[in-house]
Image (tube, helix red, strand yellow):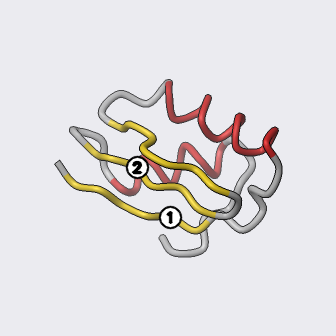
Amino acid sequence: METINLRIPNMKSPHCMMVVSGALKNLPGAALKKVVPGEAEIELSGATRDSVVETIEKAGYPVTNK
């Protein structure tokens, strides 16, 4: 397993964090470990970094450290 930290500057409010959390729940092999405004820590267990970034960006939140 690998843990990644992503910067998501437009994820500022509790609603934004809920949207990103919900999107990641639908991605097999990725578990959200910690989410705070602007950042998310995700544990990968089958998913790839690229698939996580794509999922977050499809939810409407650009990732700055792809």
Disc 2 + disc 1, Cβ < 8 Å: yes
Up-down relation of residue 49 to residue 28 (above or below):
below
Secondary structure, mark 2, is: strand
Q: Is residue 26 above or below residue 32?
A: above
Disc 2 crowd, CA 10 A, few/some/many (<14, 14-19, 20+)? many
Identify which residue is drawn at 51% across, 75% down.
65
Amino acid type indicated by mark 2 = Ile
Q: Position of residue 7 (x, y in %)?
A: 58, 68
CA distance separating discs 2 and 1: 8 Å
Looking at the image, the residue that sits furthest to the bottom is 65
Q: Which residue is the site of mark 2?
A: 42
* Residue in the picture at 65% in, 44% down: 58
Question: Could you tell me which secondary element the residue under label 1 belongs to?
Answer: strand
Q: Position of residue 33 (x, y in %)?
A: 42, 44
- Give the residue at mark 1: 6
Name the residue located 60 percent from the left edge and 65 percent from the top edge: 63
Looking at the image, residue 20 sits to the left or right of residue 41; the answer is right
Q: Which mark is residue 47?
A: none
